[in-house]
Amino acid sequence: MRKFDTKVQHLKYKVLREVAREAWDDTLLDNLLEIPKKIIPGNTPTMRCCVYKERAILSDRVKIAMGGNKDNPNIIEVIETACDECPMGGYEVTNSCRGCLAHRCEDVCKKGAISFDHHHVAHIDKSKCVDCGACAKVCPFTAIINRKRPCQNACKIKAITMNENKAAAINNDKCIACGACVYQCPFGAIMDKSYILDCIDIIKKSENNTKYKVYALVAPSISSQFTYAKLGQVISGMKELGFFTVVEAALGADMVAYAESKELAEKGFLTSSCCPAFVDYVHKAFPDLVPFISHNLSPMATIAKYIKEHEENVKIVFIGPCTAKKMEVQKEEVKPYVDSCITFEELQALFDSKDLDITALDEDILDNASYFGRIFARSGGVSDAVRQGLKEHGIEDFEFKALPCDGIEACKMALLKKSKNVLDANFIEGMACVGGCIGGAGCLTHGEKNKAEVDKYGHEAFEKTISDAISVLK
């Protein structure tokens, strides 16, 4: 069974696996130049014009797998050497142009960018065109189309432009690190920085210090990943890697839902705080709405904070589907509680870097959270959990009107309506990724079936209410 959706993901994984393999053996710096050759042996190119360019790009991938550019605060980076196959994009005239006599496209263009050849077929002068789209709107044959690069299409907040070398450029002032461009780039030219080396270092140090324990804090969306194995085997695999124990971030989701529902009833309006990309988007695009963001930390940070406050000599590594979490763990209010963050892609690389066949392992148990904490992983889950929280608080006189926002475009629309005081809702559930966390860029697999897996996992929870799940924390 395939472990990944795309070949781009598989290539990224192979780089991570080899970097991790060398790191476990303390030979990374000695064998750094050999990693590209291991991935592409021989002299036959497999993806690019020549094997030397392929290896040059792989060397850049290795750098990002080792933490990337330290001077760039964003965890999303562009590999310029790999970003050279896409057309520049913009408005183009297709072969649907019939050479009509009306020439509406020419009349409406204020920059004089439209001209015609001897067949009366229109052409656009890119040096004059400002991509206003007026010509496309008036063409009766819809012969003028707007071609965008996949990364630009994926980025719904317009944080991606092209630099002077015609490579993608990311505006850090707009970027929310959601990773949509990472997943959609067909050449893998945009990647999220990896902190897999930090994770390995934390585990290795714990092996030399028996008083020092490493907790794996896993996102509830893990239930829809690693489809080739059983979830209990994945948990066993993490312990084989050196994690002392595995805790569900869904327990933190139960804690957040319980607190957030009460906060909502007290304030009358709230937006969720669980998705770091959504929270970042509110700060960057709708700063006037920042006071409405729930004061609660995310589920990850909430349960990590509880563990750190009740256990001594603990390090916590968050494992999930989200590239934006890598930005969240660097925030001052989160940094003391979460020591490192990796994705499911990187966890798979860790398993294979140790030649660990998790399908051969016995099943361990993961049962910390309720159904409601676990369904935070999919769109609508937070709203359902907050509704349950209101019920368990006995708050019956509050009319709960939730608006689950499935993807950043839906979030933008809801926030825009709220900013104009025309929103018919008192709770915005903001999820930057389509589908929720199960659509995160760091997932192994994406798709509608993942939602069903999350709900199934939720129903398997031993604790059936939020109150029951968090009662063990009191």
Image (spheres, helix red, strand yellow):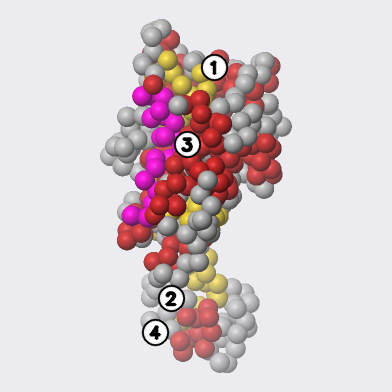
Name the residue carrying label 3. 255
Of pointers 2 and 4, the one earlier in the residue sequence? 4
Where 249 falls versus 8 (above or below)?
above
Residue closer to the observer: 286 or 65: 286
Q: Nearer the viewer, mark 4 or mark 3?
A: 3
- Nearer the observer: mark 2 or 1; the answer is 1
Q: Name the residue under label 2.
A: 132
Point out which mark residue 239 bears.
Answer: 1
Magenta span main SS: helix
Q: In which quarter of the image is residue 144?
A: bottom right
Residue 160: x %, y % from top left? 41, 56
Residue type at mark 4 is Lys
Q: Earlier along the polypeptide chain: callout 4 or callout 3?
A: 4
Residues 49 and 142: in front is: 142
Separation of disc 2 and disc 1 at Cα?
A: 55 Å
- Quadrant including the N terminus: top right
**Dot 4 corresponds to which residue?**
110
Q: Which residue is drawn at 53% across and 80% down?
A: 137
